[in-house]
Image (tube, grey):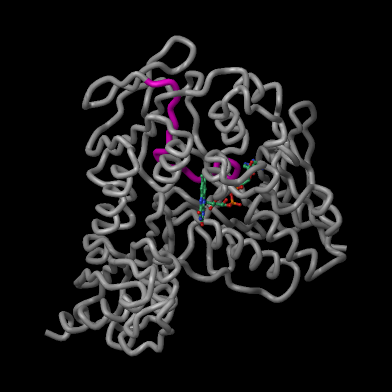
């Protein structure tokens, strides 16, 4: 009997790997250690739970511990993997009270990432939240809920520590909230706070929200947030948060703001300390370097999800784009490799979508010209605006597309899209083209669907390809 497959981390990457390995090799012992209470939860749904669009925190859970165990997986919650000894192929695990060693045949590090708060001072004050943990989401939802509407049922089926969270139910909801950071978490949380009618301020150190989505999308998000009543502080660095027990003020370059609550969403860092001294290698991003099968530089140690890099399909170089699908997919592939025939984890295109109130935005590939040049391309971009449906059909909305290609080869490098009529999912056909190394000329001849309720004859992506191809051919 082979040594067990041990997994550190019980969410997207970890449980996908454990489940797939068990399906491939039902006789293999599979052990999952999760340091917290929560397993198999949807981070991505937290802003919508805080907003109240998702009723209960239990709705964000995919698998219960019992369902995981029914799959034959030996699951241990509140067990933190402290260290790895590659020589003896053991991990050291603690429950907080006891510490023990567990041997492994294969080990998967699926420890995710954590929210950054440095270098902002004062983030330890009460009523300062990050949105990277279910407990924060639960506490924030309780804080926003007026006392007369307070009801524990919003925590149904969760593992919420009611002692910690319930006091928020007894307090008057905040009136003014500041969001520090205008990435996708900040933008989604702005919608959540405005949903509770709070005076909402969003601070962003650069000149636009959601920088990875490029200038055209940034402008559209800026307009949308302002129209929805969000007070934007662009090009503004927050220096510190001040207060005695709870946060009372935001000190920023543009002055001081009195607040009742702060949400910090200034980025994340991969959780890699576990393998810091093991011979595992790290990429420039600080995330764990892996090969096409998720293998680290240490024998029998794999890494997947937000703690690991992956190869970018456009540049062919390692990159760190911590997102949900690729975490699940890498975990599943590693489970397959460990339990049966090896399967590559696949490449990434950095495809992402974001909703800002009614505005939908998508991005994929390399859209930043400096980055494209560093990768050896000669980038050229065009931006167009076209209808989302036939002009005569109700619901037609302006849809803006930016496409970027390499002038020399014509190869598509990336693109963005925004609009209010199912714009975001349109990015997927472009993502597919990037995976195939398609040129803009080839993309212009793609057979995309047309019927008046869904698209004009020329899909906005095809219009953009036609214009960009003209520029590339000049
Ligand atoms: C607010 C928010 C919204 C998001 N929205 C989207 C979205 O719309 N689309 C999208 O694609 N992605 C989104 N993401 C990102 C997505 O949630 C992550 O990419 C995904 O959860 C990564 O999965 P993972 O398994 O690598 O890590 P995680 O989900 O972070 O899981 C890692 C687990 O490891 C545990 N752990 C850590 N250290 C140890 C240890 N030493 N021992 C044992 N256990 C340990 C942690 O407690 C955690 O449960 C969002 C993230 C956030 C925070």
Front-lying residue, 344 or 265? 265
Find out whether residue 267 is within the magenta segment.
Answer: yes
Name the image quarter holding residue 46: top right
**Residue 403 shown left or right of residue 281 in the figure:** left
Q: Is residue 93 visible?
A: no
**Residue closer to the observer: 259 or 161:** 259
What is the quadrant of the C terminus in the image? bottom left
Looking at the image, the residue that sits furthest to the left is 474
* Residue at 71 percent of width and 31 percent of height: 152
Determine if residue 295 is in view.
yes
User: Image quadrant of residue 261?
Assistant: top left
* First to last magenta residue range: 259-275
Q: Quadrant of residue 187?
A: top left
Please provide percent x and percent y for residue 347.
Answer: 48, 69
| Residue 246 within the magenta-colored segment of the rendering | no
Give percent across and percent down for residue 283.
44, 54
């Amino acid at each position: 009997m082979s040594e067990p497959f041990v997994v550190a981390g019980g969410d997207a990457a970890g449980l996908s790997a454990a489940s797939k390995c068990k399906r491939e090799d039902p006789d293999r012992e599979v052990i999952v250690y999760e340091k917290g209470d929560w397993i198999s939860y949807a981070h991505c749904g937290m802003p919508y739970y805080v907003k109240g669009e998702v009723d209960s925190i239990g709705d964000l859970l995919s698998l219960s511990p019992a369902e995981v165990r029914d799959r034959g997986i030996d699951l241990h919650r509140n067990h933190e993997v402290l260290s790895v000894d590659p020589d003896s192929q053991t991990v050291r695990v603690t429950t907080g009270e006891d510490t023990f060693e567990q041997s492994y045949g294969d080990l998967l590090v699926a420890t995710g990432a954590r929210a950054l708060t440095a270098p902002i001072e004062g983030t330890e004050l009460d009523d300062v939240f990050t949105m990277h943990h279910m407990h924060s989401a639960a506490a924030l939802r309780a804080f926003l809920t007026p006392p007369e509407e307070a009801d524990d049922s919003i925590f149904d089926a969760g593992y919420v520590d009611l002692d910690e969270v319930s006091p928020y139910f007894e307090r008057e909801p905040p009136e003014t909230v500041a969001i520090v950071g205008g990435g996708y978490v900040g933008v989604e949380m702005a919608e959540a706070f405005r949903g509770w009618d709070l005076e909402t301020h969003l601070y962003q150190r650069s000149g636009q929200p959601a920088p990875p989505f490029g200038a055209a999308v940034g402008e559209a998000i800026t307009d949308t947030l302002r129209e929805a009543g969000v007070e934007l502080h662009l090009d503004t660095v927050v220096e510190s948060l001040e207060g005695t027990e709870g946060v009372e003020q935001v000190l920023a370059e543009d002055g001081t703001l009195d607040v009742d609550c702060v949400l910090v969403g200034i980025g994340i860092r991969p959780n890699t300390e576990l393998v810091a001294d093991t011979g595992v290698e790290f990429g420039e991003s600080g995330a764990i370097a892996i090969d096409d099968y998720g293998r680290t530089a240490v024998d029998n140690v794999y890494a997947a999800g937000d703690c690991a890099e992956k190869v970018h399909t456009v540049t062919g170089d390692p990159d760190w784009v911590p997102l949900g699908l690729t975490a699940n997919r890498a975990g599943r592939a590693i489970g397959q490799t460990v339990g049966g025939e090896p399967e590559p984890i696949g490449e990434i295109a950095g495809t992402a979508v974001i909703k800002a109130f009614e505005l939908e935005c998508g991005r994929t590939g390399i859209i930043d010209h400096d980055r494209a040049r560093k990768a050896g391309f000669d980038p050229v971009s065009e931006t167009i605006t076209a209808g989302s449906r036939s002009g005569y059909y109700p619901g037609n909305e302006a849809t803006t597309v930016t496409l970027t290609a390499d002038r020399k080869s014509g190869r598509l490098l990336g693109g963005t899209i925004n609009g209010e009529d199912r714009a975001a999912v349109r990015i997927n056909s472009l993502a597919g083209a990037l995976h195939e190394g398609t040129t803009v000329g080839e993309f212009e001849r793609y057979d995309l669907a047309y019927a008046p309720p869904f698209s004009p004859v020329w899909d906005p992506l095809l219009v953009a390809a036609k214009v960009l191809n003209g520029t590339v051919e000049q």
